[in-house]
Amino acid sequence: MTERFLDIELTRRCNLRCDYCFVGWSRDWTSDLPPDVVEAVIREGAGRFDVLHLTGGEPFARKDIFDVLDLGFAHGYPRALVNTNGTMLTDAHVARLAAYGGRVELSVSFDGPAAIHDRVRGDGRFAEADRALTRLLAAGVPVTVMTVVTLEVLRALAPFLAERIASHPGLRGVTLFPVGVGPAGSQKPGAAVASLTPDELRTLAALTALAWRAGVPVTVGAFPMINPLLLALGYPAGRLYQCAAGRGRVCVHADQGVSSCHPVKEPIYGRWRPGLFDQIEGVSAHRALRERDFDGCRGCDHREACGHCRAFVTANGAPLLGNDLVCHDVVPGRREAWAAQGASPAATTGASVLPASALVRRRPGDPVAVVRRFLAILGDARWEDVAAVVAADCEDRNAVPLQPPGRDGVCFKLAFWRAERPLARVTVRDVRGAEGGAVARWETAPSPGEPVTRWEGTFSVRGGEIRAFEVRHVA
């Protein structure tokens, strides 16, 4: 039976400022989950969850962390997992952790060899974390290493894995997390973070499979789209990371929002309140997560093995239950299977469980993501979502006589277009950033099998909204 995880984000405070920290995407470095809420969550979760997962920020920034652990065990949680960067652990901490007799496991972050790790986390941080790791293992505390894989780390991955296991043979394993990139405006100022390309992800899969065959206990976490590649390379199915969103995992964040896991920030279950865990099964998003009922995934042969991580999907600008289409370039044959099913990328980006306007306020989005959402609206005829991406005073440079001005005129034009072509399909070919906004190319077909019309649009985007656009026929 799959273990059920209760993620509690104890704090967003941290002594480090890593460029790619998804908690840092909010730029909120001060919030703590109030102690009375921590106690209420743990008490209500008792008997429902198998693992008490304490995370942050840096959990050891909270002086009451051992009170929280003691409370969890007093309420019957079988075991606990704590994420840490390893730089705040003292000898007293290690002794207290060892006293739990293996019931508390730590994951300690090492983002590549020392030179790479220290460029991200600060001079000397690798050595600090390594000393803590040595003390933890010597004290009998179970530990795994957690590594964010950037392109630089990927290039040094094989020797890094070998070194970690050789120098610390007692490690439980190494979990690799492909770097995630949040929406524009959410990154650390001055940071330059790039997602791995499809080719780089395939390289990661090959290195992971080879390392496993060489005896390194390594897995890839939080990016289950890579699982079909691992299986094809002979990686054991029982070792695959499996997304538990909707299947026994819940996260209470430091701001008291409640989501399906720590990396997903949208509070799909609302704000923490007594009795919430009894109400989760009735939330439509929960059922969709449990069934993997995501746009573009329903007919996919890899649906169960993959799970298509919602944290990456939303970070790429797609709705919670939508599809960022990255799998088309990662998983061999997926693009062809999609085309064979007659699916349209623009028409199947799906609807968010939250109001679109709430998503925009929480996650402004870069111009490419905003324009992709606009084209999804064109395909879905979801006019209620227009307000989320189009400014009230938007300038339509393709004016239709007698149409209202601004956003109302955009809705009028889209509705009129859809009324004339109720079966029309919209297929997005390309959206790329441009000065002041984005340029998009897409195709429309009046009905399946009919000739397509090709379009190109230039969009001015500011503050997460389309402020002006102009569209022309290409062919």
Image (tube, grey):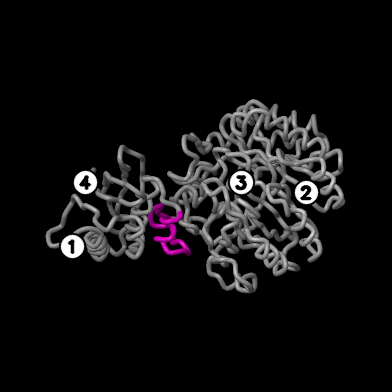
- Which sits in the foreground, 95 or 221? 95
Say left or right for 79 vs 434. right
Mark 2: few/some/many CA within 10 Å (<14, 14-19, 20+)? many
* Residue type, mark 3 in image: Pro
Q: CA distance from mark 3 to mark 4?
A: 40 Å
Q: Earlier in the sequence, mark 3 or mark 4?
A: 3
- Residue 244 image point, x, y percent: 64, 57
Residue that label 3 marks: 228
Residue that label 4 marks: 472
* Residue type, mark 4 in image: Arg
**Residue drawn where x is 82% and y is 44% of the image:** 92
Residue that label 2 marks: 105
Q: Earlier in the sequence, mark 3 or mark 2?
A: 2
**Label 1: element kind:** loop
Q: Earlier in the sequence, mark 4 or mark 2?
A: 2
- Which sits in the foreground, 454 or 197? 197
In which quadrant is the C terminus drawn? Answer: top left
**Label 3: element kind:** helix
Give the answer, above or below, for where 80 lies relative to 47.
above
Q: Does the magenta run of residues contain 248?
A: no
The stretch of residues the image draws in magenta is 342-362
Residue that label 1 marks: 404
Q: Earlier in the sequence, mark 1 or mark 3?
A: 3
Q: Earlier in the sequence, mark 2 or mark 1?
A: 2
**Label 4: element kind:** strand
- Which sits in the foreground, 10 or 226? 10
* Residue type, mark 2 in image: Glu
* Residue type, mark 1 in image: Pro
